[in-house]
Image: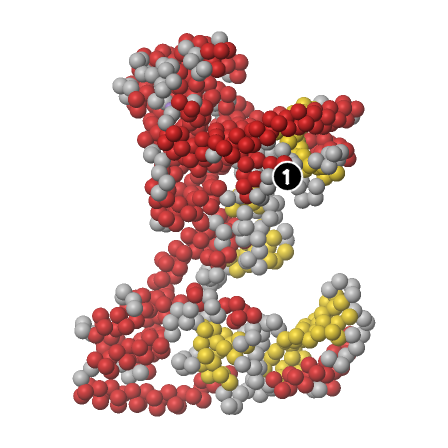
Amino acid sequence: MEEKKSRGLLSHEDMFAQLEKSVLETNPTADMSRIRAAYERAVEAHCGQKRKEGSDYVTHTIAAAQICVEMGLDEDSIIAALLHDSIEDTCLTYEDIAKQFGVTIANIVEGVTKLTRVQYTSKEDEQMENMRKMLMAMSKDIRVILIKIADRMHNMRTMEYQSEEKQRTKSLETMEIYAPIAHRLGMQRVKWELEDLSLLYLDPIGYKEITDTLKARMETLESFMGNVETTIKARLDDWGINGTIASRIKHIYSIYRKMYSQKKEIYEIFDLCAFRVIVDNIADCYNVLGHIHDMYKPLPGRFKDYISTPKPNMYQSIHTTVIGSEGIPFEVQIRTWEMHQTAEYGVAAHWKYKSGDQGAKMGDEEKFAWVRRLLEAQADSDAQDFFHDLKIDMFSDEVFVFTPQGDVINLPAGATPIDFAYVIHSAVGNHMIGAKVNGRMVQFSTVLQNGDIVEVLTSKSAPGPSRDWMKLAKSGAARNKIKQWFKKEKREENIIHGKAAFDSALRQAGLNMAAVTDEDMLPIILKKLAVASLDDVFASIGYGGMTATRAVNKVKDEIQKTLKPTQKNTLERITEKAEQRKAQHVEKQSVHGVLVEGLDNCLVKFSRCCTPIPGDDIVGFITRGYGVSVHRTDCKNYLSGRNNPQDGGRWVNVEWTTAPNESYITTIKILARERSGFLMDIATVLNSLSAKVISLNARDIDGMKSTAVVSVEVKNLEDLETIIARLGTIAGVSEITRGGN
Ligand code: MN
């Protein structure tokens, strides 16, 4: 019988006998008569069909069912697996199955059939559509994808009988779609086997190279693993800890990937071995960890506690990498038996422990929230975006952070508080004004780490997301929500504001809306402004992408070019008047001592980051809703932001008027050696110069150095330079800088 099995030609009767035995071992309460009925129905339906290697076709569905049993799936799954190809390949219908086995099983079989019909393609947009179909099927009943995975597993195991072309496409699909899904579902063992089988066909030479090398080193590796196992076991026995130790050589694809990504030769990869200690309870997990770290030197940065912070696919274990006596590093995973089941079979193990009760179902809802999230995100983004986002969300590594209430939120690696806020709710993201990580205020660009507790501060009057957030957000879902906000919600508002600004600028230029919306004029103007509609112009003015004056100037040029001479005279007259009015405005414009090119009467504020004063070279930034903020041309915000395409057109020329105001507030930073009386000396110097101090704060940096930040009122740069020169004479001062640098 062994020999027959190795050739893959077991009879279906033998295979079913084995299946029955396995079901009885793992699931003694299963209704064997239903399972047998499904088997008989499948045999009958597939009668006469053969597999490539010559066995009856039905042996494939029994093998798939066997894999389902090994995954720990329930009775319905086993029945559905036996029938999984019957709608597609035989005369059995959905109704036949529903009538004999119930609607649930018929639905699962139909779901698997739909997935089978999904043709793998290397075209991105089609791949996307396929992935979407799979997710749809999964979100309805996760067993559909589990059976599909079992089906694929058996097909991959028997791939040697297929054509080279089929071997290649199926392996590629398995590597790109099924292995990542298995990973997301927490099915490590399944993922490993799928990856190794795929690699065998995708790069047979690379595969053989690794297996040959492993074979050659097997004796050494086995003796090493044996020694470590014995040593750990002896220690646990001494301390009365009941633990089971197992070791393995890492799966081939993981070695292959390491060779490829780290460009290493196999003999350079030391941690080929992994050890696992399985104990009875969580307390023992930590006990064992203590012993391991006592026996071997732990490698820094390689310790991970997925017991206190489980992965969203439910995986729990403690991981640590230590260095053995021969200087060989190896990984040890420590977990309980229940965690072990989950680690091996992921979601599938779920049925083993909590079959059928309502609580388990609630849990599933939570666990598959990411599937739903992906589908939601898909509903309002275009196909390319969705697939790109999906790839990121599905395949990139992830971080797990907490809400202040202790809920685990799973985000892609590199995620920021912006991603976090948008996962909680779009409204939370759109109203975010600040974020705390582990109780401290952080910048929105802060990259979240595993285990961070993240809190989002919101305000109803928050101005909404800024365009920079799109770059700071790591997850496709967050970026998509921000984009939506700009496209939809804010567009209406932008149009209203922009239209009002445009209208008033038009009137200042002696024109009116009618001149622009004129039937003959409008198409010319739209072409000149390179937009599809006037609303686009308004929206752009509304968010600050274009100034109303600039738009009107362009419009005016175009109208002047087109209008007849008589009309032109009238226009000139009106324009002249407007110029006169503009001249009268000059005084008003310069209330801040700053003139803004192309903008009259606009609100001006001095940026806090670099606190410019007369004498500084300056530049203006058109903010959203807060007028123009004036920065120094050496301000780091300007230097880093000026080439940002999204802010295109928002930087404008500004200049100091000949008669600036009496005083401006500016900030300077003083770095000094730590000593007593430092602050007093600063105050004395400032006082001797009659400088008006707005604020003065000092703090220690490290007990050796301290910084003082002074806000002071000055007339101009000359004033400030005098102050800086005098402050520089204070004992211990090593550096004085202005804010913004
Ligand atoms: Mn099949």
Residue depicted at 35% across the width and 77% down the height: 550
* Depicted 14 relative to depicted 421: above or below: above
Residue depicted at 41% across the width and 71% down the height: 649
Quadrant where the image shows the C terminus:
bottom right
Q: How is the image coloured?
A: secondary structure
Amino acid type, mark 1: Glu
Task: Return the x and y of residue 416 as percentages of the image width and height.
Answer: 54, 53
Task: Return the x and y of residue 258 as percentages of the image width and height.
Answer: 57, 40
Query: Considering the numbered disc 1 on the image, is that residue within a helix, a strand or a loop?
Result: helix
* Depicted 435 relative to depicted 550: above or below: above
Task: Return the x and y of residue 194 as percentages of the image width and height.
Answer: 48, 30
Q: Which residue is mark 1?
A: 268
Q: Is residue 550 left or right of residue 4?
A: left
Task: Return the x and y of residue 273 as percentages of the image width and height.
Answer: 64, 31
- Mark 1 neighbour class, 10 Å CA radius: few under 14, some 14 to 19, many 20 or more: few
Front-lying residue, 654 or 499: 654
Residue 564 appears in the rendering: yes
* Depicted 528 relative to depicted 365: above or below: below
Front-lying residue, 469 or 236: 236
Q: Is residue 221 left or right of residue 209?
A: right
Name the quadrant where ligand 1 sits. Answer: top left
Q: Does mark 1's beta carbon lie closer than 8 Å to ligand 1?
A: no
Image quarter of residue 62:
top left
Count every numbered label the image shows and give the total.
1
Q: Is residue 739 left or right of residue 29?
A: right
Front-lying residue, 96 or 645: 645
Residue depicted at 74% across the width and 68% down the height: 706
Residue depicted at 38% across the width and 18% down the height: 53
Q: Is residue 731 left or right of residue 22?
A: right
Front-lying residue, 391 or 33: 391
